[in-house]
Amino acid sequence: MRLEGKTAIVTGAASGFGAGIARRFAAEGARVMVADLNAEGAEALTAEIGGLAQAVDVARDASVRAMAEKALSEWGRVDILVNNAGITHLPQPMEEVSEEEFDRVFAVNAKSVYLTARHLVPAMKAAGSGAILNIASTAGVSPRPRLNWYNASKGWMITATRAMAVELAPHGIRVNALNPVAGETPLLKSFMGEDTPEIRAKFLSTIPMGRFSTPEDMANAALFLCSDEAGMITGVGLEVDGGRCI
């Protein structure tokens, strides 16, 4: 029960890594807001683990503000924020990615971190404590060809994490990132372009441990970084990647 008495918001929590993190946080005693664009999926997971379900578009200021206000009105505080929601564009030459795709990738992967900070950091400052976890990617550390603007958005998240950490440390707020390798999530097919045994084998050949990351892998790392056990850790980007970035 390492999060007993804590409150947590997890975005993109209706599926994939976010769902794994939300389940683990709830199992460890946290009250969790399952926040997702997929309202039905958020409701379904909340029925399983308890807590609050919240429909949110993390790229829209009004929607993020409503999410923050709901959590603060229900709980009075937010101890943990996990910025997990993310999207990608399909693999293609960088110059062929449309402006609309580019804008959407940066709105969901980068602007969302700004918006959640805008609406939740003031309450964390007032409390003198908090843990923020940004789900970045190995793509921001060791970019893959043909995913250029996705890579760049995740590199932005890693730099934002370090900048946030140094600014918020005097207020008792820790900010870290996780850098997963691709996993069995709804985004996997988009990363690979197509999901065939041959493409999977080629993708897995770049991961020394020979497997994709799982929601459980991510949940274990997220639990540590968001718990009091990591009280002296801030500004790190922890690779959960089976050795891909070595």
Image (spheres, grey):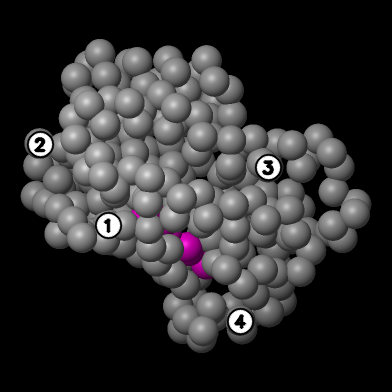
Q: Amino acid at mark 2?
A: Gly
Q: Which residue is mark 1?
A: 225
Question: In the structure shown, which secondary structural element does the residue marked by tag 2 occupy?
Answer: loop
How far apart are the alpha carbons under marks 2 and 3? 35 Å
Q: Amino acid at mark 3?
A: Val
Residue that carries the numbered disc 2 in the rendered image: 5
Residue 140 locus on image (x, y percent): 59, 62
Q: Are marks 3 and 1 in contact (CB under 8 Å)?
A: no
Residue range in magenta is 176-182
Please name which of the two marks, 2 or 1, marks the residue nearer to the observer. Answer: 1
Q: Which mark is residue 206?
A: 4
Q: Is residue 103 above or below residue 149?
A: above
Image quadrant of residue 238? bottom left
Q: Disc 3 and disc 1: Cα gap in Å?
A: 26 Å
Q: Secondary structure at mark 4?
A: loop
Q: Nearer the viewer, mark 2 or mark 4?
A: 2
Q: What residue is shown at x 64% (from left), y 75% (from top)?
A: 203
Badge 3 or badge 1: first in the primary sequence: 3
Query: Which of 175 and 172 lies nearest the eye of the viewer?
Result: 172
Classify residue 70 as left or right of residue 202: left
What x and y, as percent, mark residue 240? 42, 69
| Secondary element at image label 3 | helix
Residue that lies at the very extreme toward the right in this rendered image: 96
**Left of 231 or right of it: where is 5?**
left
Q: Is residue 32 magenta?
A: no
What is the spatial separation of the Cα atoms under label 2 and label 4, in whole angstroms? Answer: 41 Å
